Amino acid sequence: MIPWLWVSAACALEILGDYLLKLWADGGSLRHGAWGSIFYGLGGIAWGFFLRYHPLQRAIIIFAAANVLLAIALGHFAFGERLGARGSLAALLALVALVLADL
C-alpha cells in the first residue's frame, strides 16, 4: 500500500505544479511559476520514494501514464482545452500502459 501512496503523492504534487505553471505561462504572476516549480520538486522527491519499491522500467510506465491521464483531465476541466482525437487516443494508450504495467 505504501508504494501507491508515494506514486499518488508524486502525481498529485506534479499536477498541482502543472496547474500553477500553466497559470504562470498564461500571464499569471511569478509567484505561480515559483510555487509550480516547488511542487514539481516535491513531486520528484515522492517519485524517488516510489522507486524504492519498483524497478524503474515498471515505475516509469505507471508514473508517466498516470500523469498523462491527469494532465489531460486538468487541461480539459481547468483550462477548457478541447480533448480531440489525439488526446482521446493518448488517454486510451495511457490506460493500456497502466494495465500492462500492472501485469
Image: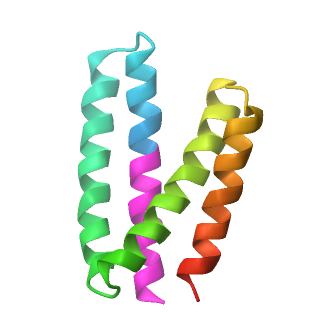
Residue 87 left/right relative to 97: right
Question: x%, y% of residue 57?
Answer: 36, 76
Q: Magenta region: which residues?
A: 1-15
Question: In the figure, 78 relative to 59: above or below?
Answer: above
On whether residue 10 falls in the magenta region, the answer is yes
Q: What's the magenta bit mostly, secondary-structure-wise?
A: helix
Q: Residue at position x 27%, y 18% from top?
A: 30
**Residue 87 image-quadrant placement:** top right
Image quadrant for the C terminus? bottom right
On whether residue 84 falls in the magenta region, the answer is no
Q: Residue at position x 35%, y 85% from top?
A: 54
Whether residue 6 is visible, yes or no, is no
Question: x%, y% of residue 50?
Answer: 33, 77
Question: x%, y% of residue 6?
Answer: 39, 74
**Residue 77 image-quadrant placement:** top right
Whether residue 19 is visible, yes or no, is yes
